[in-house]
Amino acid sequence: MINTQAHNPNSQALKKSEKAILLAGVIYSLAVSVPYAYIDSWRLLGVPGINYVASILLLCAVKMATRTLIIDPRMLVLLIWWIWLSVLGLVNLTNPLWSLKLFLADVLYTGLLPIGYAVGRSISLQAALTTLAYMFIICSSALLLICIMLVTGVLVSYGNTGRFIDPAQYTLHFVAGVTLPAFLKRWEHRRVVQNLAVIGLTAIGITFSLTSATRSSLIFTLLTTTVAPLIVSGKKSLGIMVICALLAYATYVAAPGQSRDFALGNIADRFLQSDTMGDLRFAELTGMLDQLEGHFALGYGFGVGFFSPITSSTEGFADIGLAPHIGIFTYLYKGGAVALLLYISLQIVGIVRSLKKSSRGKSFAAVMLIGALAISLVSGGYGIAYQLLLGVALGISFSPEIVDVHHEKRYKRNHPLV
């Protein structure tokens, strides 16, 4: 039975039971804000382990607040798909590239997709908006703080790339980008607050992109901060983008000399001088597709890695990758063409549903899905935060049709006897 009451909030104030959801969201945001530099094992079982526990806490908070978790056919499909890939991975146990650590990582990571879906499908619109808005504030602030700590030398950059990077930044940047639409919707009648949020995230995102020389982060920043105001608020953000660019450049100029000389030159080189055929991410993808021969339809299941020229892989398997840099193809490798089509079709249908006029209150979910799909096409798309928030956005987009919160408030005020 569909719990329609959970999707018809009539005020901006959270119910007492829903405050547990907000608290869990804040705890989750603080968990992903921990710099990986302070954790010895960061790839699979360090900070991600903390994040996973926080994700389960969020699910428990939803269960406490709603008294029930809504399970619909799409969630059943996600659960069956997750179980099938787990079984398929065990069938391929004899594969020399199979690893227990990879298997556990796949099972845990992908298991957050149906969990996130249950969260988004079960909570009220206002609880979702408020929780995601707080996540945006915390994660964008933490991203800025880590950027400053890296540039000033308080944090030591990860790896020997010469770039100013802490792996936590990528998660923070993704979370901030996909929760921005919810923040804008939550404060849709506060234009000044909306503008400050867009300007702030764009400036922070460009600063991160410059100091880390990360092309995908720059693309993701410009995409989310342009599309979110256009769809959620119905306004163009070109003027805001110019202000953001100026703020980011001012940050660049104010940075120490070594960081300043590195930032602009390196990201320009990576855009203008990149050779597609020579780029490691495309070399990795080509090799992965070669290894997929004979398993294109159904994939290998969970636990089977692939030879990767990119060393950001599991500890003890320096040349074996868990997921390709272009994350969308992870689903092809693990679940074949069937899983990839399921993954893409769910997002496209969710985007279309969220943009329907009868569902104006959920337009922010469409932008969340657009951002998630975009990042999986350039870099990333398989981490814990990604799976959880993708599931949340899908759950919201497939929830019963709802009206806009503020329109409902005005209607009740004008029709007090209704």
Image (cartoon, helix red, strand yellow):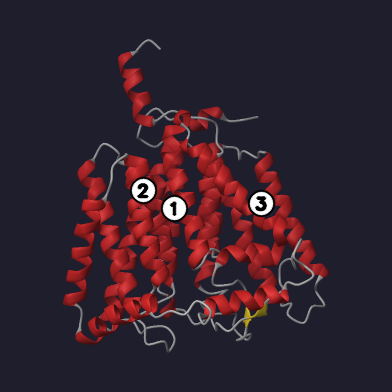
Q: Position of residue 312 (x, y in %)?
A: 53, 80
Disc 1 and disc 2 in contact, CB within 8 angstroms:
no
Q: In the rendered structure, which disc, 3 or 1, sits on the residue that comes first in sequence?
A: 1
Crowdedness near tag 1: few (<14), some (14–19) or many (≥20) residues, C-alpha within 10 Å = many
Q: Residue at x 66, y 38 (%)?
A: 72
| Camera-side residue of 93 and 69 | 93
**For the residue labelled by badge 3, is the local secondary structure a helix, a strand or a loop?**
helix
Give the mark toward the camera: 1 or 2.
2
The residue identified by callout 1 is: 25
Which quadrant holds residue 335?
A: bottom right
Q: Position of residue 278 (x, y in %)?
A: 52, 82
- Judged left or right of residue 251, residue 277 is right
Amino acid at dot 1 = Gly
The residue identified by callout 3 is: 342
Cα distance, mark 2 to mark 3? 25 Å
Amino acid at dot 2 = Ala
- Judged left or right of residue 297, residue 341 is left
